[in-house]
Image (cartoon, rainbow, N blue to C red):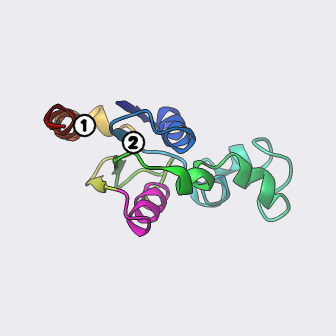
Amino acid sequence: YVTGGSAGGIMTAWIIGKNNRFKAAVVAKPVMNWISKTLVADNYFGYANSRYPGQPWENFEGYWKFSPLSLVGNIETPTMVMVGMEDLRTPPSEAKQLYHALKLRKIETVLVEIPGAGHGIASRPSNLITKIAHTLAWFEKYRQESQND
């Protein structure tokens, strides 16, 4: 199993695009596409002039090369995607790109949208419980399935 949020969400999405060794994954508040992230997130100015050379429209290939979405065609891992609906740092549109791509590919996936949560999903106790409960339930589902095989 593999999970991570924010930078860890980016790496989780990246690693399941690179190999299929995990039974299940939970990708929380990821950046899936550095082009859209640069142009919609609250800290766009921090990326627009330093993350990659040039602006997204000037260096599409460079931004895309490091976008986990570029690997979505390789993903076979059942994946839960989780995001706070008020997240301005890694907006819900980033998580939805992964979710929709996996749905189009018919890879088992669910989208957990946490109302009222920003980038720090777990900053409220009720959201922390929601995050943990969903993550554990997703992993337990695939633990049980593997025991039945």
User: Crowdedness of circle 2 by 10 Å Cα count: few (<14), some, many (20+)?
Assistant: many
Q: Residue extending furthest bottom?
A: 104
Q: Which residues are magenta?
A: 94-107
What secondary structure is found at the residue carrying circle 2?
A: strand
Q: Position of residue 50 (x, y in %)?
A: 79, 41
**In x, y percent, where is residue 7?**
53, 34
Q: Label 1, on which residue?
A: 135
Q: Secondary structure at mark 1?
A: helix
Residue found at x 20% / y 32%: 143
Quadrant location, the N terminus: top left
As shown in the figure, which amino acid type bears the numbered disc 1? Thr
User: Which quarter of the figure has residue 52?
Assistant: top right
Say how many tags the image has: 2
Given residues 37 and 65, the one toward you in this image is 65
Number of the label disc, if any, that sits on residue 38: none
Where is residue 81 shown, x and y percent of the image?
A: 36, 49
| Residue at 42% in and 60% down | 102
Residue receiving disc 2: 28
Residue at coordinates 33% horizontally, 36% vertically from top-left? 23
